């Protein structure tokens, strides 16, 4: 649904609300507000996804180009969102990654 379609719906609800005090119109207003919040959340998530995907692709390209630190792009993007893994053994992070991959793929992962 486009922004102009949402604006048209909002205007229709506003006009109908001026002539009626129907509870359904109030519910429609609440649903429209929730839809707009969901669209904003989706836009934010898309933006984060694009940043992460760009950083991952740049890191792979840097590795192929034999750059000194190919993870620079990915490290920067993760740090920007406060998602760098803690220092120390990576066992838990790797186990989480395997479990997440299994959820996405629909496969079972045995405990390591």
Image: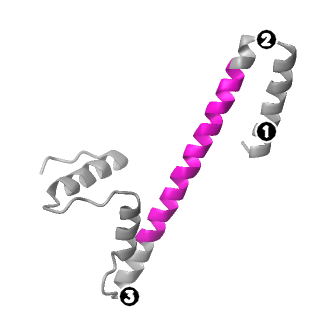
| Residue 48 sits above or below residue 24 on the image | below
Label 2's element? loop
| Label 2: how many Cα within 10 Å (few below 14, some 14–19, many 20+) | few
Point 82% across, 36% down: residue: 8
In the displayed structure image, the side of residue 25 where residue 54 appears, left or right? left
Between 40 and 18, the one nearer to me in the picture: 18
Point 71% across, 18% down: residue: 26
> CB under 8 Å between callouts 1 and 2?
no
| Residue 6 sits above or below residue 26 on the image | below
Label 3's element? loop
| Label 1: how many Cα within 10 Å (few below 14, some 14–19, many 20+) | few
* Residue numbers of the magenta segment: 27-56
Label 1's element? helix
Numbered disc in front, either 2 or 3:
2
In the displayed structure image, the side of residue 55 where residue 2 appears, left or right? right
Q: Which residue is mark 1?
A: 7
Q: Which residue is mark 2?
A: 21
Q: Which residue is mark 3?
A: 65
Mark sitting on residue 80: none
Point 38% across, 69% down: residue: 76
Point 33% across, 88% down: residue: 66
| Label 3: how many Cα within 10 Å (few below 14, some 14–19, many 20+) | few
On the image, the x and y values in percent for residue 39 come to 62, 43
């Amino acid at each position: 649904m486009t922004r102009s379609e949402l604006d048209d719906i909002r205007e229709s609800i506003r006009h109908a609300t001026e002539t009626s005090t129907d509870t359904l119109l109030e519910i429609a207003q609440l649903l429209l507000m929730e839809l707009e919040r969901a669209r904003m959340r989706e836009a934010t998530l898309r933006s984060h996804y694009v940043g992460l995907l760009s950083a991952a692709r740049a890191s792979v390209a840097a590795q192929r180009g034999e750059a000194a630190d190919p993870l620079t792009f990915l490290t920067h993007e993760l740090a920007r969102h406060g998602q760098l893994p803690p220092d120390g053994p990576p066992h838990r992070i790797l186990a989480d990654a395997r479990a997440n991959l299994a959820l996405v793929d629909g496969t079972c992962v045995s405990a390591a």
